[in-house]
Structure formats: C-alpha cells, structure tokens
Amino acid sequence: MRHFTTGDLNKQVGDVTDAASREPVVLTKHRKPRFVLMSYDHYERLRMGGDTRKVHRAAEMPAEHTDLFEAEIGRLARGEGYGDEP
C-alpha cells in the first residue's frame, strides 16, 4: 500500500488519486497514518462484503482456472501477447 502525505494530496492530487484508483493509499499527517483513500468500487466491495476473489494453491486451482492459465502460458510461449495488446 502506497503512502502519501496530506501535503502530497494538495500538491499532486492527480498522482494520489491515480494511485488510489488502483489500490487504497494511506494519507499521513505528521508522519502518522490519518486517512485511507480508495476508489468507490473498492469501497463498495468492502462495504457489501462482495469481494468474490479467492486464493488457491496452484495444485488446487479449479479446472476452469487451470485451463485459462495453460492457454495463456501457451500463448506467451509462442511469442504472442507481448506487443499485440491494444
């Protein structure tokens, strides 16, 4: 999690809000954490408990994830996917 001072927020609002759009950021004042800034979507997921992401060990990955993972690894092994993204 990135940290910014409240002064950074005043001077670099674009940089701070861009970072907060990707992940929550901590805003500090007098070197102490005071606030957390995050995207509205992230806030709603926290509020509603709707974060459906799951963590799996590779050996225990569901079959549909294994199939997607293997397909992407194959694509990268063929040299695809490095410069062809829009």
Image (tube, grey):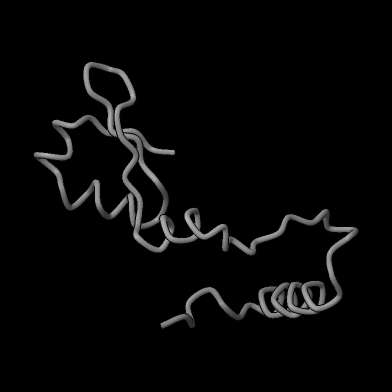
Q: Give coordinates of residue 29: x percent, y percent.
A: 22, 23
Q: Give coordinates of residue 25: x percent, y percent.
A: 36, 41
Residue 55 in the figure: left or right of residue 28: right
Q: Relative to residue 30, is residue 3 depicted above or below?
A: below
Residue 62 sits in which quadrant? bottom right
Residue 48 in the figure: left or right of residue 24: right
Q: Residue extending furthest right? A: 59
Q: Give coordinates of residue 3: x percent, y percent.
A: 34, 33
Which of these two is toward me, 25 or 44?
A: 44
Residue located 43% across and 60% down the image: 44
Residue located 42% across and 50% down the image: 23
Q: Relative to residue 70, is residue 60 depicted above or below?
A: above
Rendered-image quadrant of the C terminus: bottom left
Rendered-image quadrant of the N terminus: top left
Q: Residue extending furthest front? A: 48
Residue 72 in the figure: left or right of residue 10: right
Residue 36 sits in which quadrant? top left
Residue 29 in the figure: left or right of residue 11: right
Residue 78 sits in which quadrant? bottom right
Q: Relative to residue 57, is residue 63 depicted above or below?
A: below
The tally of labels here is 0
Q: Residue extending furthest left? A: 11
Residue located 68% across and 80% down the image: 75
Q: Give coordinates of residue 34: x percent, y percent.
A: 30, 27
Q: Relative to residue 36, is residue 52 depicted above or below?
A: below
Residue located 22% across and 29% down the image: 5
